[in-house]
Image (spheres, rainbow, N blue to C red):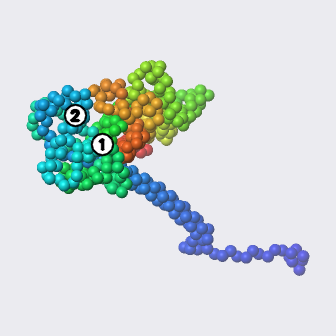
Amino acid sequence: MSAASVDAPLDPPPRPKSSLLAPSDRTRRRRAAERRFRACGVAAISVGVLFLAVLAAAIIRSGAPAFTRTVVDVTITLSREQFERAEGQLLKTAAYEAVLIGALQEMLEEREERAPFDAASLRRILGKTGGSLREFFRANEDRIGRPVEFTLPASSRVDGYMNGRVSRDSLTDSRFLKAADLDLVDALAGAGIIHSEFNWPFITGADSGVDNPGGAGIGAAVVGSFFMMLVVLALSLPIGVAASIYLEEFAPRNWFTDLIEVNISNLAAVPSIVFGILGLAVFIQFFHLPQSAPLVGGLVLTLMTLPTIIISTRASLKAVPPSIRDAALALGASKTQAVFHHVLPLAMPGILTGTIIGLAQALGETAPLLLIGMVGFVARGYPDGFVAGFTDPNSAMPAQIYTWASRADPGFYEKAWGGIIVLLIFLLSMNIVAIVLRRVFERRW
């Protein structure tokens, strides 16, 4: 036997035969990794949903009391002599409040109410209602001398006691409410004179000042936000879409367009307060546009929203397959016809979605509006007409919420949470509209 045959390596051991019906070790490890990845994804989604549920529960729990109010039912018979005497006094509102206190005292005496009360305790229970009484009788002088039933809001602390925010243990005697007054509140509630109802004035009313949280409403601020969003929609959508179409479909690729694209991306990351300073310096101080007007707020938010709309629109245009453009050009269409007849309709769902998301982002901005004067206490009434809605001083929902949250009375804190609920409803509605529009305009290729 030769040396070569002796030194020849032995044959490798045969590999174990695998079956197509039984998974291999590598397949089992891959499937285990996939199961772990799915479990991590489900856990992440569950944690996000949990935090969202906790946040929603906290907002609803804190803001629900703003949608109910405590009211006092009282019948007042104002004589002509009392009316003329009240109008002749310097403090007319206080004179009408004295008439209200007297009418409520008579009602309690007729019911033989046992709880101790006096004019001071009734004044602490009632809210600031003298102004509304004066406005009613001045507008309806024919009702003077006849019984008139009023449903008037109670004070903010009585309202807090009725909805559970204020308790007997936590209440300390002050000029606003004393612990002994709660016995009278319970007696009035048992007699049906004081009760709770849905707070429609919160939905339809306006800011009532720093000393009357019970009469505060967000309706005027909602109108201000509406006119402001009209300005943003009318300017940002055509300008943003036109700029996106030019940059994506027609602009030459050179250093100038690259510079524009970089600046658009940088503008999307600029803090919103910078746009507020820009609006204050340019639109108000240079162009002398009306301060605190939704027109100026809409112009500022348009500048802030344009980068978002341009970026989202360009992404939607890029998502359209190049074969659509090539097919249109091959059939004899011009570049403009290919873009506007074929590319733009296919990109429309993404464009509308990006636009509404940009509008929703602008709707929640506060800092730029505060710098141009759209603070909460400006919203004291509704505009007189459609044009006045753009030019008259007004506020917006985020600014109104910020103003309420910065006030000391706990009643305004509840109103701030209630305003957050209204704002979230608007944002959810806008996102639902975006989803519906995407479904309507969506095309498949």
Q: Position of residue 404 (x, y in %)?
A: 39, 40
Q: Is residue 134 left or right of residue 376?
A: left
Tell me if mark 1 has few (under 14), some (14-19) or many (20+) residues whose alpha carbon lies within 10 angstroms of its own: many
Q: Position of residue 83 (x, y in %)?
A: 15, 31
Tag 2: residue type? Ala
**Which part of the image, by quadrant, shows the C terminus?**
top left
Q: Is residue 314 left or right of residue 127?
A: right
- Label 1 close to label 2 by CB (< 8 Å): no
Q: Position of residue 340 (x, y in %)?
A: 43, 31
Name the one closer to the observer, 18 or 235: 235
Q: Is residue 143 left or right of residue 39?
A: left
User: Residue 143's image quarter?
Assistant: top left
Q: Earlier in the sequence, mark 1 or mark 2?
A: 2
Tag 2 residue: 95
**Which part of the image, by quadrant, shows the N terminus?**
bottom right
Name the one closer to the observer, 396 or 16: 396
Q: Is residue 166 above or below residue 347?
A: below
Disc 1 versus disc 2: nearer the observer? 2
Any part of residue 126 in sight: no
Tell me if mark 2 has few (under 14), some (14-19) or many (20+) residues whose alpha carbon lies within 10 angstroms of its own: many
C-alpha separation, residue under disc 1 versus residue under disc 2 = 21 Å
Q: Position of residue 236 (x, y in %)?
A: 43, 31
Name the one closer to the observer, 179 or 201: 179
Task: Specify the label residue 269 is tagged with.
Answer: none
Tag 1: residue type? Gly
Q: Is residue 267 above or below residue 163?
A: above
Task: Specify the label residue 214 is tagged with.
Answer: 1
**Element assignment for label 1:** helix
Any part of residue 83 in sight: yes
**Element assignment for label 2:** helix
